[in-house]
Structures are given as structure tokens and as C-alpha cells.
Amino acid sequence: MKSARVTATHAIGALVVLLNVGSVAAETLQLRDNAAVTGRILADKKDQVVIDLGYTVLTVPRAEIIRVVKESESDVRATALPAIQEARAGLYAVATTPPPEKPVREWVQLLGESVVQVRAPSGLGSGFFVTEDGHLITNFHVIEGETKLSVEVYHQRNGQLERRSYKDVRIVAMNKFADLSLLKVEDKDAPKFKRVLLGDPGSLSVGERVFAIGSPLGLERTVTEGILSTKTRQMGGALYLQTTAQINPGNSGGPLFNLRGEVIGVTNMKLTFGEGLGFAIPGDELKYFLNHRDAFAYDNDNPSNPFRYLEPPSRMRSTTP
């Protein structure tokens, strides 16, 4: 695992998808001790039931289940995410009107496919898609010094999760000083990917709830929740969002969400000597990076150089008569 800063370790990942949801019925397992879990049953076996909770798959022993309650189609339809009006802003999309707030539990089920695990020979981190054709964001320190990358994605196929690895991943742009990188999956048989909407961190207030989903220590599809502690924490000459959402090595490069399901930051570090002290690159910094990605374009002819230096104008060149 790489470290992001001298005083910090890796940060967090997350997940997001903002499309209409089908009316698939859910089941609730009533358990002993007045407990219950709700999701989609993937396998109903003699001794156990496998249920998809959105952010993870849980195996429940049959002896612990009192009964199974199925929601009606109309009930699910009533809780489904309404259509969100979107607008393109260059390489990413934003909501034209604020999406409705929802519990983390519901957002996790809606947004899961858009968060990925980014793997390099020296370690791993998290990332998230910003376009359907495979553009994704991660931290610079996740891929620093690497060119051979792969991306692990969980696709929903016929009500089940299908893990797939994409190995043709190109570095499009990177900004070492902002700790941001833009990658693109270019596998020939790659499908359309689920992608996130970017939100405005300026609309958040200190104390509002936020959440992240990523791969801490390689544990994919892990969800953490907390509050926004401050929006202007200065560290190393830059401003960060500070959050109590737990972050750990392997989470670096994933998004931080508000309860509207929008990405408002890219988590990238935590303080090693305390708990609940996580930090994220503000969404405004991410939008600036994407809007000016040509200035940070990766030079494939010189992998050790994170920037492409353009040729001088032709009129500046000396010519021989």
C-alpha cells in the first residue's frame, strides 16, 4: 500500500449510479432477537439464504430466519428513485435540480456499480466512473509510477452481482499536486458503465451527513458514514473537506457523497494518529481538473513525466532560408 502524505494514509472510495430503478421486489428476512435485513434474495438453499444488501452479499443461516416478508411491486415502485434531470458539463454530469434526499441504505443499492477497485502492481485503491464510456477518477498516489493498471467492476446481471476485471486501462490525465488522475477503460468488449453525478460542496453545511463506499484494505463494497466536520481544512497549502466517515488504506480515490447521492469530494487521506479524521478533495477541485484535463494530459511517450508539454508555436521556431 502506498501512503498519500507523510502525515496521512490512504483514503476512501465510494459508489454512485443515477439512473431510473426498475420495480424489482425486495424481501425482508425477519431474524431472531428482533433483527431484520432487507434486500434481494440471490439463493434460497436448504440450510442458508444468500441476500444482496446492495453494498455487500450476506449469507444467513436458515436456523436464524423466522420468516421471509416480500414487498409488493407497488411498494417498491413508491420508494424507487424518481427521474433526475441531468445536464452535461464537459466530461461529467450534474443534476439541474437537487435530487431528493434518501437514506444511505437506499443510495447504496442505487449507486453500487459505479464505484470500482483500481489495481496496480504495487497496491490498490478505489475509483468511480464519471462517464458511461469508461472515464473514471482515482487519486494520483494510487497509480504513481505505474502504467500497468486494471479495474474491478461489479455488474448487476439478472439480479446477481458479477465481478469483472478490465485490464486495458489508459491514463488520460493526472495532477500530482491536486492528487487526482483520470483513467479510461478501453477493453473492446466493455459495456456502458454506470456513472455518478457531481454535486456542489458549497451547498453543504457543516454537520450534514455524508457517506463513502470503497475498498478499505481490499474489502470491496464497504460503506462508511459520518458527518461533514468542516469544508475548509487547510493542509499543505490546500483546502480539504474534513469528515468523520472512516477511511483506511485502499479507499483512496473513491467519492464522498451527500444524501442526495451526488459526489461532493474525492477522499484521499486520513490522520494516522486519530480516528474520525478523514479528508477529501473538494468537488470544485475535481471539476476544475476535468474541465482543464488537456493541461494535465498524460504523455504516453514519457511515462515518468505526469504532464505533456506542448510544442512551441511554429512562428517561434528558427527556419533555414
Image (cartoon, grey):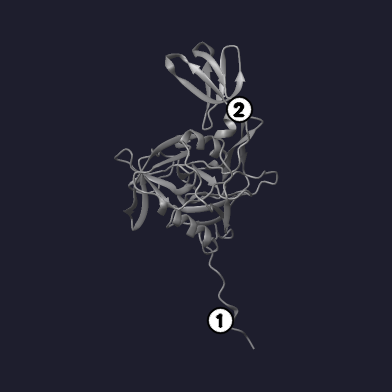
Q: CA distance from mark 1 to mark 2?
A: 67 Å
Question: Hey, what amino acid is under mark 2?
Answer: Ala
The residue under label 1 is 316
Residue at the spot 52% in from the left edge and 30% down from the top edge = 56
Query: Relative to the observer, which residue lies in front, 267 or 84?
Result: 84
| Residue 166 rendering spot, x and y as whole percentages | 62, 42
Query: Relative to the observer, which residue lies in front, 125 or 65?
Result: 65
> Where is residue 190, by image quadrant?
top right
| Residue 185 rendering spot, x and y as whole percentages | 62, 48
Can residue 220 be seen here? no
Residue at the spot 53% in from the left edge and 45% down from the top edge = 128
Q: Is residue 301 left or right of residue 208?
A: right
SS for tag 2?
Answer: loop
| Residue 280 rendering spot, x and y as whole percentages | 40, 48
The residue under label 2 is 25
User: Is there CB contact under 8 Å for labels 1 and 2?
Assistant: no
> How crowded is the residue under tag 1: few (<14 C-alpha within 10 Å), some, or many (20+)?
few
Q: Which mark is residue 216?
A: none
Question: Hey, what amino acid is under mark 1?
Answer: Met
> Where is residue 318, by image quadrant?
bottom right
Quadrant including the C terminus? bottom right
Query: Relative to the observer, which residue lies in front, 303 or 52?
Result: 52
| Residue 67 rendering spot, x and y as whole percentages | 53, 14
